[in-house]
Amino acid sequence: MSENRRTPGKPIDSGKLDQIVSQARRDSEKRQAGYREQSLRIHPWICGRCGREFTRGNLHELTVHHKDHNHDNNPPDGSNWENLCLYCHDNEHQRHVDQVRGYDGLAPAKPAQAATFNPFADLKSMLGGDDEK
């Protein structure tokens, strides 16, 4: 394993790095193409959240969401997938991040304190507006 690590001060082997990145991209595309194509065959071309309908012309905007957030859990019956539009998919992942961080979507645990600073409190005198018309 030490042979895969870069020695400090030694230049990065860009050829090897390019091979690693290229292989990772191929593997990712292969995995995504597999379950995406299956999900598009099994499920209707409709966002499972907002109900937006898709055609061949805009199908690239329909994503496959893993309900359990495990991208390696791809049962052939599609039970872990739902088709979501780009916007609903982003929202779902943000909700998951919030949940992991402990945010439940309700009011904050500590009530926010009211602001006491007023930057315009002395504005009239600063503008020389003591003389009224």
Image (tube, helix red, strand yellow):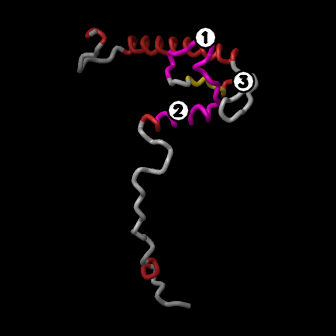
Q: Which residues are magenta?
A: 70-97
Which of the numbered marks, if any, corresponds to residue 45?
A: 3
Pick the quarter of the image with the N terminus: top left
Q: What's the amino acid at mark 3? A: Trp
Of callouts 3 and 1, the N-terminal one? 3
Pick the quarter of the image with the C terminus: bottom right
Secondary structure at numbered mark 3: loop
For image coordinates 52% across by 24% down, the residue present is 68
| In the rendered image, the vertical position of residue 5 relative to residue 59, given as above or below | above
**Which residue position holds label 1?**
76
Q: Nearer the viewer, residue 13 or 107?
A: 107
Secondary structure at numbered mark 2: helix
**Which residue position holds label 2?**
93
> Residue 17 location, x and y as percent?
39, 15
For image coordinates 39% across by 53% down, the residue present is 110
Answer left or right for 13 relative to 76: left
